[in-house]
Amino acid sequence: MNSMTQEEPKNIEPTANLASQAVDLSPPETPDAPPRQATEQSEVRHAETPTSDHLLGLNTMVEIDDLSFSYDMGKTNTLKNISLNIPEKQVTAFIGPSGCGKSTLIRCLNRMNDLVETSCITNGEIRIMGQHIHAKSVSPIELRKQVGMVFQKYNPFPKSIYDNVAYGLRIQGIKKKNLLDEAVEKSLRGAALWDEVKDRLKDSALGLSGGQQQRLCIARTIAVQPKVILMDEPCSALDPIATAKVEELIMELRRDFTIVIVTHSMQQASRISDHTAFFYLGELIEYGKTDMIFSNPNQKQTEDYISGRFG
Ligand SMILES: Nc1ncnc2c1ncn2[C@@H]1O[C@H](COP(=O)(O)OP(=O)(O)OP(=O)(O)O)[C@@H](O)[C@H]1O
Ligand SMILES: [Mg+2]
């Protein structure tokens, strides 16, 4: 896994994958951190469920059901009664002003927030491929094999390009050179980086440009074949050319992966996402097809935000 901005942990292991393609968020062999339990039942305040016609005919990958989340043991909810379904093999963008909870929500999806000791789910639940991800039986480590993450600040390990991509596979126990070679090439091709690095696979990843390093982090994530890829502002540290490459890549990746992307760029959300969710002050204000959200939003707050009137 990659790492990210200041409050986020450094060098968390990349998703070492599941060889199994089955729906398997199986129990750990050794106990993990205690499961996050709701410390209190937040007041049941079912926000008006945003219309979900745009999801008709699509398979659901992630179900977020009336979720409330707190960083301070339930004293205040940073996320409030959020319900939305994320469809399989589509790009779903989370937008909203700074501090509205986009990163918090995305980090709930692979339980990265478990690393914040005082955090807890205060209401509701998240299911991925039908599995309640905060169930006692689910290991966060196993979950993160299925739900990979790409962060704002690319963070290749101080290893060779090859070793970065092979990292998760080796953790998974794959040692045969021909298998690793094949997977490394496939992942680098998948991340649209192969042609640029094929002659220097043994060179340090830190010698790549920023845009190349971010694509390398994406290659490292896809090498272990997660089902879902979470991206928290993956282009915010990149120049326009590198951004365009990563955007192109995201549109390619949606053929095989379910992608959730946080972005501050309205243009980016409208270029690359199929569905957009707008958040404000920890609440989901509107969720719909990206074209509709940007051309004809239902809510005034959404309109104000996308037209730059606040945020
Ligand atoms: N580890 C943490 N501990 C306590 N509070 C936190 C933590 N991380 C975020 N918060 C708080 O939760 C709220 C939502 O933050 P979050 O990072 O999810 O917002 P965001 O929408 O991603 O903002 P931005 O667009 O600036 O990245 C903010 O008030 C923030 O201060
Ligand atoms: Mg954020």
Image: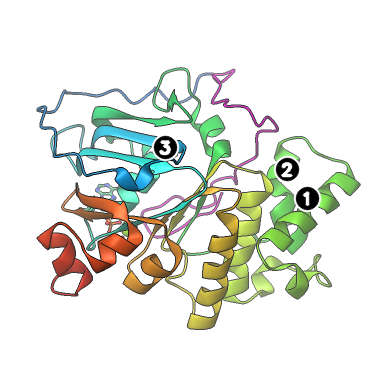
x 60%, y 46%: residue: 14
* Left or right for 156, reference 236: right
Q: Which residue is mark 3?
A: 62
Q: Which residue is mark 1?
A: 183
SS of the residue under disc 1: helix
Considering only order in the chain, which callout, 1 or 3, is on the residue closer to the N terminus? 3
Q: Amino acid at mark 3?
A: Val
Q: Amino acid at mark 1?
A: Ala
Image depth: mark 3 or mark 1 in front: 3
Looking at the rendering, which quadrant does residue 248 occupy? bottom right
Q: Which residue is mark 2?
A: 169
Image depth: mark 2 or mark 3 in front: 3
Q: Tell me the colour scheme of the image.
A: rainbow
x 38%, y 65%: residue: 269
Image depth: mark 1 or mark 2 in front: 1
Q: Range of the magenta residues?
A: 1-30
